[in-house]
Image: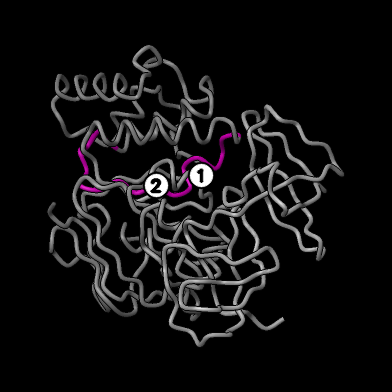
Amino acid sequence: MSELLSLKDIKCSIDGLTVVNGVNMQVNKGNLVCLLGPSGCGKTTVLRAIAGFQSVDEGEISLHEQLVSAKGFMQPPEKRRVGMVFQDYALFPHLTVGDNVSFGIRHLPPAERADTVNRMLALVGLDAMKSRYPHELSGGQQQRVALARALAPKPDLILMDEPFSNLDVELRERVSYEVRDILKQQGATAVLVTHDQHEAFALGDQVGVMNNGRILQWDTPYNLYHEPCCAFIAEFIGQGVFLPGVLTSPDIIETEIGHHRGNRSYNWETGSKVELLLRPDDIIADPESDLRATVTKKAFKGAEILYTLKLKSGAEILSVLPSHADHGIGDELGIRVETDHLVAFPQRQQ
């Protein structure tokens, strides 16, 4: 696949404060990627730099191998062939849905412009809403109008800045999948910025996790969850707890609940104190097991229940189990540990 977007060691500052520090990133044509991280990590600044709204202090940004940003040089946004979907959708309230979508293609002949609007609205499932105004639409519908408007000029790249944050939790993930399907159907290339890992995982082929102005890991959602490169990502992605342990051999860690062997080896000294990451799906119910834990909390999630389990030492772990068996607070469960992905880090100072 051909490379469409390239960021090489870019640095950006705002009011003299460095907010993006040495970011590298490549996006191939047709890929959907996400920048994921907590508020203030620099992800929106990276997006603004790609769009041409933010200058770079160091490094280079290229589109189709053509330089668009460098120190002292910034190609104007309108020359970059980039479409933008904003957090608040930025629809014109006085224009109909059809007129909003046609806003960026006013240079086209009327017949071609009308055909494009009709195709875009059909693509996002809103062809019957063409004559309505934004205030007459739901949040999810407004979001799809904003996407149709961004796609209408056939940009090389779509940039989306927290586009689902105004939707309620139930709608957010469903609309994320809908948008992914629309973008894939169009063969579009897109970069999404979000603090919500569910959105990132629903939409992204690749996800870059950012913190303190840097991308810590650029990987698939699967690997970010099962193979995090550092403790920050292990805690930021998914749920889980760290259990103290000792490295007894390169591929075995001993904890209070037994010896654990997985899919990797560590080159730390034997006897090193470590923290073993245990995800809820690593803890399996096993009535025959001698290892016991007590239910202290539970969260019903429909098909499954997330349990907080207390070990004999007082340490707590999490387990997600099918909801057919409804264990009560105070119940003692037999469990076993399946660390297919043996993820551990050196023990941190308390």
Side (left or right) of 313 relative to 228: right
CA–CA distance in space, label 1 to label 2: 15 Å
Q: Residue at x 74, y 49 (%)?
A: 308
Side (left or right) of 336 relative to 139: right
Marking on residue 198: 1
Q: Please report the bounds of the magenta region as a residue range.
A: 151-168
* SS assignment at label 2: strand
Percent across and percent down for residue 217 are: 40, 66
For the C terminus, which image quadrant? bottom right
- Up the image or down, 274 lies above or below 156; here it is below
Give the main secondary structure, helix, strand or loop, of the magenta stretch.
Answer: loop
Most extreme residue toward the bottom is: 269
The front one of 217 and 155 is 217
Q: Residues within 10 Å of mark 2 (few under 14, many from 20)?
A: many
In which quadrant of the rendered view does residue 254 lie? bottom right
Percent across and percent down for residue 50 are: 31, 60
Q: Amino acid at mark 2?
A: Met
* SS assignment at label 1: helix
Marking on residue 106: none
Q: Amino acid at mark 1?
A: His
Side (left or right) of 89 relative to 101: right
Most extreme residue toward the top is: 128
Check if residue 98 falls in the magenta segment: no
Check if residue 165 falls in the magenta segment: yes
Of mark 1 and mark 2, the one earlier in the sequence is: 2
Residue where numbered disc 2 is placed: 160
Q: Residues within 10 Å of mark 1 (few under 14, many from 20)?
A: some
